[in-house]
Image: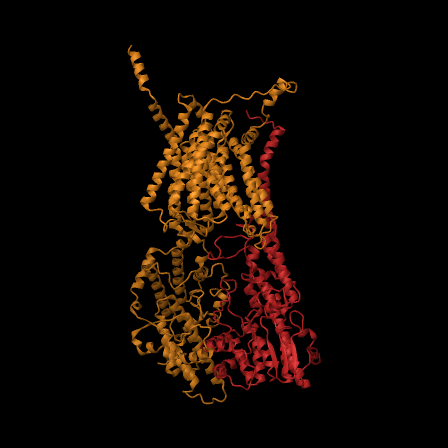
Chain colours: A orange, B red
Amino acid sequence: MTTEATLSALTTRRHEASSTAWFWWKETRQLAPLIALLATVSLLIIVINAILDAAIGGQLRFRLPHEVTMLVFPGLFATGAGPLLVGQERSQRTIDWLALLPISSQRIATTKLLVAIAGLAVMWLFALLVITTFGLGRRETSYWMIGSTTGYSGNPFSYPVWISHSLFVLVAGYFVAWRIKNQFYSLIALIPLAFSPVIATSLVSEYVGRSLQTGQLDWINFGFTLLGIVIVTPLTYRAAIATLGAADAPAVTPLLDVSPHSPASETNDAIAPAFGTQTAPIIWQSLHSAKGMLAILVGMLLISFLAAVQLAAVDRYRGITGLLFWLLPLAPLAVCWLGISVFKHDGASQRIRFLADRGVSHRKAYLALHAVPISILSGSLLIYGVWNMTVVHEESVSGFAAGLPTVVTMLMFAAVIYSISQWVSQFVRTLILSVILAPILSLIAAGWLSFAYVSLGFPILGLVLCIAAPMIASWSMMRRYMDSTDRPVTFLAAGVVVAVITLLPVGVATSYVLSIPAMHPNQRQQLLNEAQSAPASSHRFVSIPMGGFLDSFQRLSYPYNDPMRDLKESLEHYQMDPQASVRLLKSRPDDNFIAQTNLYDYQRWHGGMMRARLRWRQAQNDPAQNDPAQNDPAWAELASWLDASGVLLSALRRGRLLTDQEIADRLEVLLIDTLRHDVPPERDDDAAVQMAIAAIGTPASRSAARRGAVVATLQSLLRNDKDRYYNFRLTALECQPEGLVGWMEPRMQDAFFIALLEGIEASAGRSEDQGWRLKLHALHQPGGVFQTSRYGDEMRSMPAMETMTLGRISGYGQLWGRDWEYVNFNHRKQP
Amino acid sequence: MSATRKTSRDRAMIALTLTPPIALILFCVSAAATWQAGSATIRPLLEQSFSSELIDSPSPEAADYAARTSKEQTKSYRELIAAVDSLNYQYQFLFDALAEQEDLFDNLDQEHPVDAYIAEYLADAAPLLEMVRQFKFRASAIWQPNELGNPYRFSNGMLQSRGLTDLLMVEFRSAVRDKQTDRAIEAFDLFERLDPGINASASQRILPLVTRSIASGIWGEAELNQLDRRVHGSRDLEDIWQNRLRGTKLSQLPWLLRGEVSESWRYDAIPKTYAPSRRIQWLRHQDEFSRVRGIGTLAAIKQVIELENEWASQSESALDLALQIPAYNQHHHPGGSTQYFAILFAGIANERRYARTAIAVARYKLKYGDDPATLDDLSKVGLPRSETLDPTGHPFLFESDEQGCRLGNAAIEFTDGRGYSGLFDSRDSTLSSIVKQFVMLEFR
C-alpha cells in the first residue's frame, strides 16, 4: 500500500513542467560550444585589431569597426543555432531518440526554436549593452577600412533591420536543417535563403530604376525580412513535424520482369566494387559518399575560374561583368570547405570508427582522406597555371589580367587555407562550428602570413614551415583521432600550431633586427656624459648668410610680373660680400659663436670664392699687369675671401650638427686648395693669408670637433625622440622590410654613430682601415657598389676638391681621412 | 588484413587521385628548369654586346664610363662650373627675361633694355669665358665623379651643371647683336664641344639660336660655310641612339644577370622576383629598338610606336613566369620612354635641316645678290633637296616676294587644336609633336 501511495505520489508529481525545464536545459547546453566559439572569434577580432593598431599603426590598410566584434555574437549565433541544434542531432541520429521520448513533436520543434530565439535575444541584449556602454557605435570612431575604401557604420536605423534579419536567418537555419538531411547541403541552401531579403531589395531598387536613399532601402529590407519570417516559420514547423514523425513507407513499385534480375545477380550488384589494397577503397568511398558535395565544391571552383577568365578577356567592367568580381571569392571559400571536408563530411565520424575497427593504419587513413581534396586542388592549380600561359598579362589588354597572381602565389594561399581548414575540421567536433571557424581562421592566417612576408621580411622557407605546421599537427593527432582519444592532447597540439604560426615570423624578424649590433649602454652613457660636459654647449648660435643677400628679395611667382623689373631689383638687392656675411663674427671674436648655415648657401660661397680665384689668376697672367702691387683689386678681393673664410671656418668648426662639420670640412678643403694653388708664397705675410692659415686645423682638432658634433647629435636624439629632424637620413632604412623599420631605426642609428666614431678615430690616426667606410656606405647607399662610391679607395685617392659634393650630402664622412687632412702649413706661418 | 594484390580498380583509383598532384609537381619542376635554363642564356646574350671583363666588374657602368673619359680637364671644369653657377645665381632673373624675348635678333641696331644687363653679365663673366677659351673643354676629357652603380648616381655634387651652357648661349646672343661673328662662332664651337647631352632640354641647345641669327644677315660667306660644316658634322643621331640603348643595358646588368632590383618600400612595398624570360624579353626589346633604322625620321617614330604597341598587347607565356612572386606582370621598365627619344631626335634632325636650309638661303643671297625664288634654287649653292624637307617629307614653307623671303621650319603653319596631343594621325598633330613650335625666319 505504501508503494502504491508512493507510486501515485510520483505519478502526480511528474507533470509537464519538469520535462519542459529539462528539455530547455538540454538544448541550452547543446548551444554551449557555439557560445564558446563566438567568444573565441570575437576575442580573436579584438586581439587582431589591437595588434594591428599597436604594431603597425595604420600601415596595414584593413580595419574593422569595433562594433563588428560585438555583432559577431548575434550574427553567428543566428547562423549556427539551427544547424547545431537540429542538423547535428540528425547526423548523429539522436533526433530519433528524441522522437521516441513521450514528448510530442510539436513540443520538440517549438522548444528548439524558442530556445534559440531566447538565446538570440540574450545575444542581442549583450551586444547592444556593450556597444552603448562603451560607445562603440559613434561615427567618429566607428569606421571600417579595406584597402582604400573607408565606410562608416553609424546608421541608427539599421539596428532594427539587423535584429529582424538575424531572426530571419535563425528561422531559415532551422528550416534548412529540418528539410535537408545532409548537413553540408543544408548549409549551402542556407546561404541564398539568408540573403533573399537583400536580393529582393536590390531587385526592387533595380525595378524602380533610380537609386533609393538608405532609409528607404532599410524600410524595404525590413518589410521583406518580416515577410520572410512570416513565410518560413510555418514551413519550418511543418518540416519539423514531418521529420519527427513516422517515416513514409517506401513507394510500392510494380513487379518488374524478373528474368534479367536473377537472385544471384541482384546480390552481386548490391556488393560494392572489390579492391585489393586498403587505400583505394577509402578513396573510392570518399568520392562515392560525397559525390554531391564534391560536385558542388568543384562547381564553385569552376564558376570562380570562369569568372576570372571572363574578367581577363575584357577591358572594361560594365554591368554584369562588374558583378563577376563577387564570384571570385568562391574559390578560396571552396578551398576552405575542401579542407573541412577532409574530416567533416556526411557520416565522417562513423567512417573513421569503421576504418579504425578494420585496423587500417592511421597513416593510410590520413593519406587516403586527404587524397581527393588535394588532387582536386592540384588539378585546379594546374588548370590555372596552364590557362595563364595563354593570357596576355598587360594593362592595355586587361587590367585584371595584368594583376593576376602567379601559380606559386596561389599555391601558397591555397595551401594556407587548406592546411588551416583541415586542421580545424579535425580539431572541432561539429560541422557547423568548423564551417564558421575555418574561414575566419584561414583568413586571419593568410592575412598574417602575407603581412609577415611583405612587411616583416619573412622568408619563403618560413612560410612553408608555417603552412606545414597544421598539417603536421593533424597528422600526429590522427591515431588518437581515430580512437576518439584526441582530447585534451589536441588542444596542446593546437597551441603548438598557433605558437608556430604567430611566433615564427616574429622570431625571424626579431633575430633579423637583433643582428644589427646596438651600442652598449655603457658606451652610450659615456658619450652622453661627454656631450653634457662639452664646452661648446654653452655657445650661442648665429645664422650666417653665406649665400649672399639675394634671398631677402622675395620674388612672387606671379606670371604677370615684369621680368625686366624683377631683374633690375634683384641686381640691386644682391650682395655677395664675404666680409658682410661674417661681420657679426668679426666684430665679437671673443664670443665664440657657432655659425649656422646650410649646404645650398655653402655652394654659393664656394662659387664666389672660385670667381675670386679665377679673377686673380687672370690678373696674374695678364701681361699688362706688370707690377703686382699689394693693393691691386683682384688680390684685394681674394684676400677678403680668404679672411672671411678663415673667420667662418673657426665658427663652423664649433658647430654641433653633423652637417655643420661637413660644411666646415668642405670650406677647409676649399681654403687649403686656395692656399696651395692660388696664393703665391710672396703674399704669405698678408694678414688675410695668415688668418686663413691659422684657421686650418690639425687632424686632432678636427677629430675633436667632429666628435663633439656626433655626441651632441646623439644627445639630442635621445632627448627628443619625437622630433624627426635628426640632421641625417639613413637611406638604408628605406630598403628594409616596411614593418621592421621602426624597430631597426634605433639600432641602425647606433650602428651609424659607432661607424662615425670609428671613422673619426681612423682619420685622426691616418689609418687605412676600411671597416667604418664599408659601414657608412651600407647605411647611406644600400645596394650600391662600394668601389665606385665616394667611400671607396678609387675616389678617395683623388683630390677632395675634384670629387666632393657641394650642394647635397650623399653620405657623412666622405671627406674624412683623405689626403687634404694631413697637409701642413706650418712652414708658411708667420710668427 | 592488408591485401597486397592490386587490382586494376586499385590502380585506377590511386592513379586518379595521384595524377593531378604529380602533374602539378611536374609543372613546377619544369618551370624551375625553364628558369634555370633562361638564367643561363642571359650572359651569352650580353656577351654579344659587352666584353666579359666589363660584365664581371663590380660596376660595369662605372668601368665603361671610365674607359670612355679621362680626368684631364676634371679639376679645371669643376672650378669653372662652381664659379659659373655662382655668377648665374646672381643673374638668375636675366635668364628669365631672355627666355621671354622672341625678337632678340630682329633688329640688331635697336637698343634693347636687356642689353645693358647682358653687358654687365658678360663683363662679370669675362674671366670665366677666358678660362673656357683657354681650356677648350670637351666632354670626353671631363670625368665626372658620379657614383655609378650606387643609388642617386649622377651625384657629381654640382647642383647645376647647365650654368656653362647658359653662359655660352648668352655670349652667342651678345656676339650676334654686336655683329661679332668670330666671337659668335667661337661660342657655338665651345658649346658643341661640351656635348650637353641629347636629352638636355630644348632651351639648352644652341642650334635654334644659330638659325635665328642667320636671318640677321651678319654672316659672311666663309663663316656661313663654316657653320654649315659644323651643323652637317654634328654627332650622328644613329650613334647617339645606339649609345643610349647600350648605356641603359649596362646600367641594368645586375637586374639582367641576377634579377636584383633594390627598391625602397616607399615605392614598392612587396618584394618581387623577376623571371629570366621577362628579363630576356626586355633585352630583346632593346635589341629591336637598336635595329630601328633612320633615326630622326618620322618613319623611325612610327616604327617605335608600332613596336611598343605590339609589345603592349603581347606577353610572354613562358613556364618560368609561374614561379615569379607575386604576379605575372611585374612592372620594371628601365630606360625611359624610347618613343620620347625617337620624337626628340626627329625634332633635332629637323632643326639641323632647317639650320642648313637657312644657311643655304643666306649663302644664295650673298652669292647671287637676290632672294631664291623657291627652295629648289638652293641646289645651286650645294644644298641637297633632302635637306629642305620637314619631318613629314614636304619642303619647308618658303615665301619669296618683294619685301624679302621667309622660311618656316615646317611645310605648313601647324597648330594642334587639341594642344600637344602627342599623336601622329594628322599632319598638324605630327608636326606639333615633333617640331613643337612653328618658327618663321625673315631674311633681311
Seen in the picture, residue A612 relative to A463 is either above or below; the reply is below
Q: Position of residue A550 (x, y in %)?
A: 41, 76
In the image, taking residue A540 as reference, residue B442 lies left or right, namely right
Depth check, front residue: B340 or B232:
B340
Question: Image point 49% across, 33% down: which residue?
Answer: A184
- The answer to whether residue A329 shows anywhere in this view is yes
Depth check, front residue: A96 or A404:
A96
Q: Position of residue B148 (x, y in %)?
A: 52, 64
Marks counted in the figure total 0
Seen in the picture, residue B297 relative to A520 is either above or below; the reply is below
Question: Image point 53% across, 56% down: which residue?
Answer: B260
Depth check, front residue: B425 or B210:
B425
Image quadrant holding the N terminus of chain A, namely top left
Image quadrant holding the C terminus of chain A, namely bottom left
Depth check, front residue: B244 or A63:
A63
Q: Position of residue A684 (x, y in %)?
A: 40, 82
